[in-house]
Image (cartoon, helix red, strand yellow):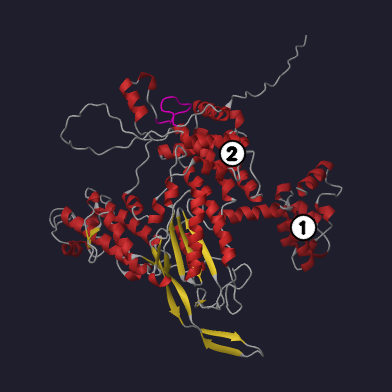
Amino acid sequence: MHSTYTFTRRPPDPNDPASLMKEDGVAVCSQMWTENFREPDKTVTNLSNYLRRFELWVLAYQKVCADETGSYMPRSSVTRAALEDLLALRNAVLDGKFKWGARLEFFIRSPKDKTEYESLSKRKIKAILTTTQRAAFQDRIVQEVLFMVLEPVYEARFSQKSYAFRPGRNAHTVLRVIRRSFAGYLWYIRGDLSTVLDGMKVGMVINALMRDVRDKKVIDLIKAALTTPVITSKFDDGEKKKKTKRKYQKKKVLAEDEPKPDPYWLDSFFGFAPEEAEICPSWGHCGILSPLLANVCLDELDRWMEDKIKEFYRPSTNDVIWNSPDGEAEQGNTSWPEFVPTSGPDKTRKIDYIRYGGHILIGVRGPRADAATLRKQLIEFCDQKYMLKLDNECLPIEHITKGIMFLDHVLCRRVVYPTLRYTATGGKIISEKGVGTLLSVTASLKQCIKQFRKLSFLKGDRDPDPQPCFRMFHATQAHTNAQMNKFLSTMVEWYRYADNRKKIVNFCSYIIRGSLAKLYAAKYKLRSRAKVYKIGARNLSRPLKEKKGQSPEFHNLLRMGLVESIDGLQYTRMSLVPETDYSPLPLGWRPDHEKALVEYIRLEDSRTLEEQRNCLKELGLVSPQDYISMLVWNYKRNAISADRVSSMLSGENGMKKESDLFGSNDESSEEDKEESVSEAQM
């Protein structure tokens, strides 16, 4: 008797988190970026579909855990319990049951959070509910998911005139754009709109969002984050605490999963942040979404200014530059790329604009009346759009000869008299002296001294005197020197595009070296900096704690591996400082990730492939091997191998009919033909 067994496949459990992870989260993000850059003007209505993608929630969990613990957690290391809690959080967001700012009830908790909330006392519960607390772990996950969903939507639509809080753009990009595009502008308007970043009415933010996003679930989620009150009060139980003597604080030992604090050099460099980069918006419970929302709101100002640039543009046929319809022609003298003819009644009138966060810079080439008119219109626009009351003092008009301060760099001009050569009628070459200007971008020494004074590295204004950095008192000489070398290397990179890079870095090196010398003099009781330099050399690379007859030679200890190698301070001489980077920023510059996206979208277009094929046929100069390589690269999505392509090629220059390239030969199956044709037509 034969028994029969029938296998029935069980349907996947919809509540099983593992069954929901069909793709990698990074691949889903890449798909969103590609879709939005392919159609940047399309109104987005289907963001809820991406909110349902569990892969994005797992990726957000990994990113928040990395911030929490200081180390990246691979997807394979995420526990089953964490995935189930993450799924519960996702379902709560989709069903509208999620609430921002929860203090005691959580769908998911941090791996570090071991608190037993059920057994807390009433006093501790009251303290949790009434005092300022860091954003909950689950709130940060939801913020990350919203950020991953919204960033590609708006990055494809943002103006190219804004550079803060955006990937691939930073303060260095602003300085390079200013050096390239702002030469020749006489009048400058600097505006501080940072009060907009302190907070904006919820209705304005939502209206700005709904210009491009019409997904009710996402809009309601952000609206709830903006309107839910944030508790910022301090807990006071009414009891006066007894004054206790200050006890000796032991050195803190970090736990295994506790992130390390910022090192001293990085903490010090953060103190050098320019005024324009100090303010980072934080609205309600939006967290990392706040800078993106600020750019969404201020993008209307960018678009308005782009229209004003076209409106104010008045070309002059007598001018050698900026006389093309779009005003973006290359400058006339190739040997002087920044050379711009001086202003006059018969010269081109033009304005340009750039925004870094809440700070704007407008350059005007023409009479001061144009700048005054633009300022008046800008004040009216900010009043109507942002309810922001500005006056003439908030938007000062400054002449280039006075020096314009922006991002701790001073913009000024140098008048030059180059020899201009051009061909006149009849082919005669004429040489004559021209008068023009070059834009100079120099680091502000005054601002540098101000930042050092804020960090307690020096005192005094006219004759700055270095002060010992006592925070490094208990560190070894090798560790202290290494920290300051990293600090100096970062300073060298920050002043990379300053005309006076050598001088400003040499000054920073002098302050830091003097500060360390005073520290070592106090630490090793050497009385003066001169004694420190005598023992430790100019760059402080020799050990200072070694005394004759009391310890073995430093080199012997170093050879035996008993002491650390002491690196000398960098840039102790001006000749060691790198030169200024004058590499030009090309016209139409875009970050590398945007260029890669645009190129990828262009190559996916079937018309691009047809243009390449026609171009090769017309030229007839491409070798068969090059053509094979090109076909394999273009047809990699069709999984056509190099051998198959080469077997299909024949005739002059190795080319054959288009039908053969798509698999119409007898050796290929009918399924291959249909698949190849359908994918080629996509």
Measured as percent of width and height from the top left, residue 362 is found at: 48, 63
The residue nearer to you, when weighing 370 against 151, is 370
User: Residue at coordinates 45% horizontally, 50% vertically from top-left?
Assistant: 388
Measured as percent of width and height from the top left, residue 463 is found at: 22, 66
Q: Does any portion of residue 310 appear in the rendered image?
A: yes
Image quarter (top left, top right, bottom left or bottom right) of the N terminus? top right
Along the polypeptide, which appears first: circle 1 or circle 2? 2
The residue nearer to you, when weighing 44 against 573, is 44
Amino acid on which the number 1 mark rests in the picture: Glu
Q: Mark 2 = which residue?
A: 24
Q: Is residue 111 magenta?
A: yes
> Mark 1–mark 2 contact, CB under 8 Å?
no
Per the image, label 1 sits on a secondary structure element best described as: helix
Q: Is residue 163 magenta?
A: no
Q: Quadrant of residue 591?
A: bottom right
- The magenta segment is 101-112
Q: Is residue 348 left or right of residue 667?
A: left
Is residue 282 positioned above or below 192 on the image?
A: above
Q: Mark 1 = which residue?
A: 610
The residue nearer to you, when weighing 323 against 193, is 193
Measured as percent of width and height from the top left, residue 360 is found at: 46, 58
